[in-house]
């Protein structure tokens, strides 16, 4: 039996326990990627290297990564991909200045840091697995957990407050603090939006609050999911069918 759970798996379980079973136990894979996922991965890889000042030519770096991602899913150049290259040229120069604008002087603590921590709160012996895009430390002694997200024009207030989006950072903070025995009051969490089609401010960094109550609620979701998973409760949540890749297929009729 699997001994770890990621936030992506938890979120899938919250959408539909049966979909989680198909995706993470049966390993059924319908979606292999598209132009948008390739763009996101390539830009993410660029950010990872920019913060360490390892990139001489950001445009070339992005294009090479983008081409590799597209080739891996069999995508050929089209109008959208050409537009995405142009959009990346606008986003790229804004990334590092925006980090400085929001955080001032800082030091990079870690990039793509893996979490693989014991879940001590529940009855089921599991580990929480995740990768934190960026952790920096500012001059006031605080740590900042940052997650890059690519999108089109941005997120509205409803999406920014969506618990099934923000719980990702809440749990990252919880387990990161446990890993290093850091006081949660010294850690803040942020999403960094990389916006393809925005007319201005193509990089937006905003804070996500992750206080004790929110942490408690996110942890309850996690431990509840593990109980049901361990008992093989794979209920089909029909409310999620319309947006599910398995809907009306041989796997879920």
Image: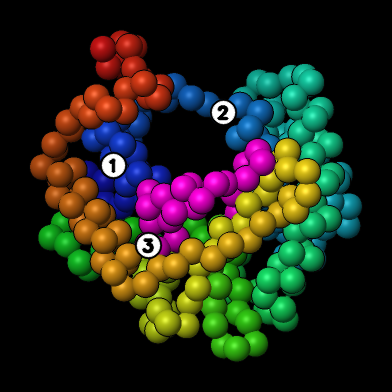
**In magenta segment, residue 160:** yes
- Element marked by disc 2: loop
Mark 2 packing: few (<14 Cα in 10 Å), some, or many (20+)?
A: some
- Element marked by disc 3: helix
Q: Nearer the viewer, residue 71 or 148?
A: 148
Q: Which residue bears the numbered disc 2?
A: 33
Visible residue check, residue 114: no
Q: Nearer the viewer, residue 63 or 212?
A: 212
Horizontal and vertical percent position of residue 205: 63, 61
Horizontal and vertical percent position of residue 252: 27, 17
Please report the residue visible at 62 percent of the width from the left and 57 percent of the height from the top: 192
Mark 1 packing: few (<14 Cα in 10 Å), some, or many (20+)?
A: some
| Of the two numbered discs 2 and 3 in the rendering, the one whose residue sits closer to the viewer | 3
Residue with the most extreme bottom position: 140
Visible residue check, residue 69: yes
Q: Which residue bears the numbered disc 1?
A: 14
């Amino acid at each position: 039996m699997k001994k770890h759970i990621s936030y992506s798996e938890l979120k899938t379980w919250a959408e539909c326990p049966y979909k989680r079973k198909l995706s993470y136990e049966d390993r059924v894979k319908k979606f292999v990627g598209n132009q948008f996922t390739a763009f996101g991965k390539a830009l993410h890889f660029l950010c990872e290297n920019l913060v360490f000042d390892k990139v001489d030519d950001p445009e070339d770096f992005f294009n090479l990564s983008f081409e590799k991602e597209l080739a891996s899913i069999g995508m050929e150049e089209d109008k959208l991909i050409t537009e995405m290259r142009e959009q990346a040229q606008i986003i790229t120069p804004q990334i590092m200045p925006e980090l400085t604008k929001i955080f001032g002087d800082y030091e990079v603590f870690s990039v793509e840091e893996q979490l693989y921590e014991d879940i001590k709160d529940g009855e089921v012996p599991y580990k929480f697995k995740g990768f934190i895009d960026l952790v920096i430390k500012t001059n006031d002694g605080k740590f900042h957990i940052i997650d890059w997200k690519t999108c089109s024009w941005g997120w509205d207030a409803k999406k920014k407050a969506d618990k099934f989006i923000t719980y990702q950072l809440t749990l990252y903070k919880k387990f990161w603090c446990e890993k290093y025995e850091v006081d949660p009051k010294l850690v803040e969490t942020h999403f960094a939006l990389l916006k393809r089609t925005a007319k201005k401010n193509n990089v937006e960094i905003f804070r996500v609050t992750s206080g004790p109550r929110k942490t408690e609620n996110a942890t309850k979701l996690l431990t509840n999911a593990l109980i049901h998973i361990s008992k093989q409760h794979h209920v089909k949540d029909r409310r999620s069918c319309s947006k599910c890749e398995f809907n009306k297929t041989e796997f879920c009729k």
